Amino acid sequence: MKKKFKAGVVQFDVKNGQIETNFNAVLGYLEELASKNVCLAVLPEMFSCSFDNENLKEHSKFTKKIVERLSSFAGQNQMAIAGTLPENDGGCIFNTMIFIDVDGKIKGRYRKLHLFRLTDEHIYYTAGNKIVTIDSSFGRIGLMICYDLRFPELARSLFLKDAQMIIVSAQWPEPRKEHWQTLIKARSIENQMFMICSNRTGIDDDLRFVGMSMIVDPMGNTLAQARSDETFVFADIDPGLVESAKTLIPCMTDRRPDVYG
């Protein structure tokens, strides 16, 4: 990761089970980001169908076609795209983040490790079992999904695998918006990397989603943050800030794994 580039995050009201409506919204935002010369775009969690959990096997049938269309868009616009979709593997449904690079090729898939029991995710989904980093056109990137933010072990594992950036797709609710902001900044500061985090907006049943998608640099400075409306924001990413942060505060050098593992 050497050259400066623009990264963007998209947030919108993801409609339960309404794949065509959601995908049209996604394409509209991606086209706008492309017009701003953004070359990395992150979409919200389960952006195709949201958590329409009773119908996930049906919705997962459309995932391949959606990924193909996004791959085509990525290649035509030299824009990397990441977001999560339902994936059916042998009858098991995973909440899977797909990372498509600027050449339109899929560079990585990450299955959500931590399932949120408060909304019964553990009933409808199968948890992943692999930590994923990808070597992209922008350097090494770690992948995380929503609830994963609450587990510093995962972010630290990505740090130890030399990730320079973590991408997060989320559906994070308004009542815990302070947690969202605080955890993103904490993961950035303690691991000295960029955080590119997309969250949905809108209301699902009685639950309001906060938006507040964020881009944070390796020192915890907010480069861009949305409010709660349907929108996108983007920021210039200077990859050199990762090494600068590590040089200024040499956390990697001063770790004590001999004591704490």
Image (tube, rainbow, N blue to C red):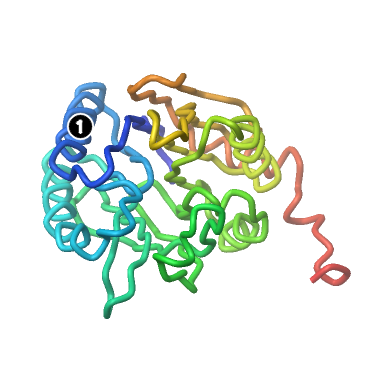
Element under disc 1: helix
Residue ID at (31%, 51%): 52
Q: In the orientation shown, which residue stands out farthest toward the right?
A: 259
Q: Is residue 25 left or right of residue 217?
A: left
Q: Which quadrant: the C terminus?
A: bottom right
136 vs 106, nearest the viewer: 106
Q: Which kind of residue does numbered mark 1 sit on?
A: Ala
Coordinates of residue 151 in the picture (x, y in percent): 64, 56
238 vs 199, nearest the viewer: 199
Coordinates of residue 53 in the picture (x, y in percent): 33, 57
Please, is residue 91 above or below residue 16 in the view?
A: below
Residue ID at (46%, 46%): 168
Residue ID at (54%, 40%): 194
- Identify the image quadrant of residue 33: top left
Please, is residue 78 above or below residue 118 in the view?
A: above
Coordinates of residue 94 in the picture (x, y in percent): 36, 66
Q: Is residue 237 left or right of residue 185?
A: left
Count the numbered circles shown: 1
239 vs 60, nearest the viewer: 60
Please, is residue 255 above or below residue 17 in the view?
A: below
Q: Is residue 148 left or right of residue 112?
A: right
Q: Residues within 10 Å of mark 1 (few under 14, many from 20)?
A: some
- Identify the image quadrant of residue 198: top left
Q: Is residue 191 left or right of residue 256?
A: left
Residue ID at (50%, 48%): 146
Which residue is identified by label 1? 25
Coordinates of residue 54 in the picture (x, y in percent): 30, 59
Q: In the orientation shown, which residue stands out farthest toward the bottom?
A: 90
